[in-house]
Amino acid sequence: MAKIVESLKRLSVEHESRNHDNNRTARRKGELTLSVEKVVAPDHNYILCICGTQSEPEFRIGTALSDYTCVIYSVGESLTETIKLTHNQAPVVGIRFSPTSRNILYTATSNGLITACDLRARGKVVAEFKDSTEGGKLKPLSSFDISCDDRLIAGGTEHVGGDAFILFWDIRYSNSKLDDKNNLLGGYWESHMEDVTSLAFHTSKQDVLASGSTDGLINVFDLTQPSEDSALTYSLNTESSVDRIGWLNDDNLWCTTHMHSLQLWNCDGATPYAKFERSSLALFQNDDPNSCYTVRVHASNTLEQPFLLTGSSSVKGENLRCLNVVNGRLEACYNMAGNKQIVRDSWLHEKSGSLITVGEGGRINIWREAETSPVEQNSSHKLIAKIGTGKGRDRQHRSKPY
C-alpha cells in the first residue's frame, strides 16, 4: 500500500466540508411531478443504475442496462440519446462520471474490469483498470467509486478464495493507459469477510473511504496510513447485509440494507443514531410492509433537506415517495404520482432539483417540484417544468459475533 500513501501525499487540494442538519423540522408534504417519462429499454431490459453531471443548464446522465450496454443522454428541455457504449462483456456493477469532467465516464463490470470512456471520441475506451496479479485472472467486482479529486479509484470484490478485496488504482499513472501492464496500486483484504457491496469516498476528503459488505460491516479507512490495520479507523456493525452506503455530512453515514431497512451512523458511534426497519416504510393504512423497498438516500438540501427515496410494488401498482427523519420517525416529504416500474436507482441534479429514477420497466423518469402544470407526455418528451431553471433486492444475511 506504500504506493497509495505516496500518491495521496502528493495531493494538495483542500476541500470544505459539507454540513447538513438532519434534524430540522420537516416542511409541509408536497408533490414531485412527473415531468418526462421515456421508455428507453424495452423487451424486459432493466436499467440497473444511473449517474449524472451537475453541469447546467443542460446536463448529462449515464445509464447502465442489464444487457451490459451503457447509454448517455443529454437533458435540457428534452431527453436526447447521445452515445451508446457496447464494450462491456459482463454485467455492469457501477457507473460514474469523472468528478472533474463531464466527458469521461467510468464503468465497472463484474468480470473485474473498470474502463474510462471519452465521450468526445464517441465513447472510446481510453483507459482500463484491473488486477492481473494472479496470472491474469481478474477478481470479480461488486462495487466501485472515484475519489472527489478524480485521482483514485477503489473497487470492491466479491468473496473469492477466502477473501474479499478493496483494490486501488491511481488514475494519473501513465501505465493506466491501454496496454498489458498491471496498474494496481494495492489492496485491502482483511477488513471484510464477504462481498464488498458498496464503496463511498468522502465527498470532500479524498483520502477517506467507507465500505459496506454483506458481512454486515461498514468500515471507514484513512488511506494515508501505511497499512490496512492502521488505515481502518472505524468499523460499524449493522447486524444486517449492507446494500448501499453514502456520506450524509462530514462524520455521518447512511446505510440501506438488503432487508430494506435504513440506518444512520456517526462514525464514532457504537450503534446507529437512527434505525428504521422495513415496516417503518409503510406510512399509510393500506401499505403492505412486504411490498416496500428502499432505493437510496439523497444527502443534498436541494429539496429542502436530505431524504430517502422508497417505493412499493404490489397488485395495486408501483408507488414512490420521499421520506425524511422527523423527531425520530420517517415521514413523507414528497409524494410522487405516476410511477410505473420498480425503481432500481436514482440521481439528483442539484441545480434544477430534478430527481431522475430508472428501473425494471426500462424507463427514465424525471421528477420536479410542480411549478406549472402536471405531466403532459408527448412524443417529443418535452419537459413541462423546464429543467435547469428552477430548483426487489432481498438477500439473506448471517449475524456476526461482533
Image (cartoon, rainbow, N blue to C red):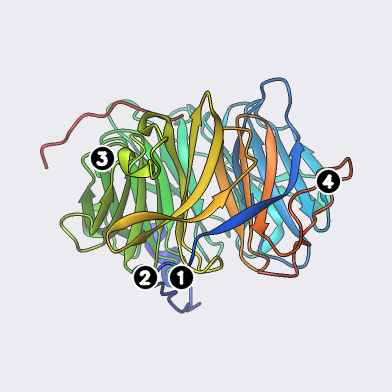
Cα separation between marks 3 and 2: 22 Å
Q: Earlier in the sequence, mark 1 or mark 2?
A: 1
Do callouts 1 and 3 mark residues in contact (Cβ within 8 Å)? no
- Is 334 positioned to the left or the right of 101 in the image? left
* Residue 250, disc: 2
Nearer-N-terminus badge (1/4): 1
The residue positioned farthest toward the left in the image shown: 401
Name the quadrant of the C terminus: top left
Does residue 173 appear anywhere in the picture? no
The residue closer to the viewer here, 283 or 166, is 283
Residue that label 4 marks? 381
Q: What residue type is disc 3 on?
A: Gly
Q: Few, some or many C-alpha atoms within 10 Å of disc 2 (few <14, some 14-19, many ≥20)?
A: some
Q: Are marks 1 and 2 in contact (CB under 8 Å)?
A: yes
Element assignment for label 1? loop
Q: Earlier in the sequence, mark 3 or mark 2?
A: 3
Q: Which residue is the site of mark 1?
A: 204
Question: x%, y% of residue 134?
Answer: 42, 30
- Dividing the picture into quadrants, the one containing residue 217 is top left
